[in-house]
Image: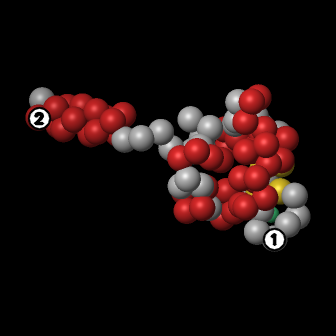
Amino acid sequence: MRVIAVITLLALVACATPAKKPAFDAADTNNDGKISNQEFKKLFKSSDQDKADAQFNRQDTNRDGLLTGPEYDLWDTIGSDDSQRPF
Ligand SMILES: [Ca+2]
Ligand SMILES: [Ca+2]
């Protein structure tokens, strides 16, 4: 019974934390292990497509037009500007 209480508490804490970036796998809609600019832009509202481009370019550090796992994870570091967050 106590374990359930702890799990419930942890779940509540998890829900209370601010929205994080979508999971890589959810963003990678064609499952090729990379996030294309098109896939990335789907994470943003249609009115924020310019922001999406700017954000994508910041994260695509090797300029190959695709975000791989480590580049996608940069969202947490260089995407910390709240005005750039889609949600
Ligand atoms: Ca992909
Ligand atoms: Ca890249």
Nearer to the camera, 25 or 44:
44
Q: Earlier in the sequence, mark 2 or mark 1?
A: 2
Which one is nearer the viewer's eye here, 54 or 67? 54
From the viewer's perspective, tell me whether residue 8 is left or right of residue 31: left
Q: Which residue is mark 1?
A: 62
For label 1, count other residues whose C-alpha is less than 10 Å away and answer few (under 14), some (14-19) or many (20+): few
Label 2 Cα crowd, 10 Å radius (few <14 / some 14-19 / many 20+) = few
Q: Look at 76% across and 68% down and name the residue there.
A: 61
| Amino acid beneath label 2 | Arg
Instruction: Say if residue 60 shows up in the picture.
Output: yes
Specify the quadrant of the image occupied by residue 85: top right
Q: Amino acid at mark 1?
A: Asn
Q: CA distance from mark 2 to mark 1?
A: 49 Å
Q: Which residue is mark 2?
A: 2
Residue 18, disc: none
Q: Nearer the viewer, mark 2 or mark 1?
A: 1
